[in-house]
Amino acid sequence: MFDELSEKLDSVLGRFRQRGVLTEPMIKDGLREVRRVLLEADVNYKVTRQFLNRVQEKALGEEVLKSVSPGQQIVKIVNDELATLLGEGRPTIEWAAAPPTVILVVGLQGSGKTTTAAKLARRIKREGREPMLAACDLVRPAAVEQLTTLAERIDVPIHAGAAGGDPVETAREALRVAKAEKRAVLIVDTAGRLQIDEALMRELREIRDAVSPHEILFVADAMTGQEAVKIAQGFDDELDVSGIVLTKMDGDARGGAALSIRSVVGKPIKFVGMGEGVDDLDVADPERLAGRILQKGDIVGLVERAERAVDVDASERLQKKMMGEGKFTLEDFLLAMRQVQKMGPLDQLMKLIPGMGKKMPMADIDPKRIKHVEAIILSMTPEERRRPELLNGSRRARIAKGSGRSVAEVNRLMKQFKDMRKMMKRMRSMQGFMPR
């Protein structure tokens, strides 16, 4: 997310950080570079101009020019203004006073609308509420089947209409069922088209009037850049959406849609889709998003991913072994690696850790490399995984052949594992000197 934008902005702002003294011409020259970077990222021209006007006004203030670290002050101003551009405060869902809270999910075909409905249900369920899904996209082939499959995967009930049926009546009936079953939330997935047309908008308005939603979330494909902003404006004009969900933010999105859509449409970005998995929906916290753009990391986001993905019991067992209660084996190493994999691609995780974005070469966190390590460990016998000291030359050759990797890769893995054991031994010995 924001990779290209982040790198270019970091390069420009780095020049500010390196200078002990800043003059007005230096600041203006630097902000011209920021302008170029934002426009290349497909940020709306008017939004860019307003953003830079605010930054320049604050950056040219006397307290910045005469401060001990003017470069850092300007970086902070850019960070604060980026957060303002993305929203104000942590976005929330408007919960109904008397359940169910009805959430209408709208958007064009191909934007990830149906998947987003399921991700939202999953997130709400994790938070302790009882959601229900309604499949009201009765036009697109397999739309109902897709949402039904997702509902089964996340163990959430679904009310599905028949293909070619009446989506308005389906939505109305789903609301009756949700009330009867005392569901806390009803998420209504609606039909989309390849482009906005009057027939679609008429259908969506009728569904809106039938279920009186507390939230109307417009799903936008971040990959489409400024086009997503125009489409969002069209949906808002017709339906008065309450918030926006940006999907495919883990792809090659240049960031223009994310940085433009709130200013142009005037509605908050509430969630961002960060992958294909049902857990890959993050709250669009402006401060945290701004931190990611400026490569400051997002520790809160990292913790949230860990809470979703990691098996607590398995983690506790691993921690005990690492801290001295039992011997850390290759089986434990494989378990730890799988736990981390569940949290998402390692290159994404590294970017959430402050200061790690550039220090970790991409080659070291290649997902294929992780699969190779897994193949090597799985080619060992259970006894070899528990007792790595058994791995002599002939055994290593057999493991290399069985995993389809080279003996050199097996040797490298065993050296890394040995180094890890040494490090954990030092950590355990240091514990004895730690105050209790």
Image (tube, grey):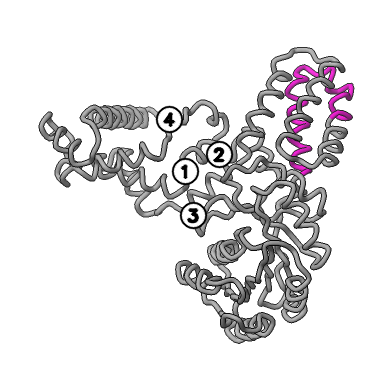
Give the residue type at disc 4. Ala
**Is residue 239 in the magenta section?**
no
Report the magenta residues as a range.
56-85
Residue 128, image x and y in percent? 55, 67
- Secondary structure, mark 2, is loop
Residue 361, image x and y in percent? 47, 27
Give the residue type at disc 3. Arg
- Label located before the other in sequence (2 or 3): 3
What is the C-alpha distance between the residues marked 2 and 3? 16 Å
Label 4 packing within 10 angstroms: few (<14), some (14-19), many (20+): few
Numbered badge on residue 363: 4
Label 2 packing within 10 angstroms: few (<14), some (14-19), many (20+): many
- Label located before the other in sequence (4 or 1): 1
Numbered badge on residue 308: 3
SS assignment for the magenta stretch, majority: helix
- Label located before the other in sequence (4 or 3): 3
Numbered badge on residue 352: 2
Q: Badges 4 and 3: C-beta atoms under 8 Å apart?
A: no
Looking at the image, residue 369 sits to the left or right of residue 298; the answer is: left
Give the residue type at disc 1. Pro
Q: Badges 2 and 1: C-beta atoms under 8 Å apart?
A: no
Indicate which label's residue lies in the foreground, 4 or 3.
Answer: 4
What is the C-alpha distance between the residues marked 4 and 3? 27 Å
- Secondary structure, mark 4, is helix
Which residue sits at x=55%, y=71%?
143
Residue 184 visible in the current orientation: no
Which residue sits at x=87%, y=17%?
24
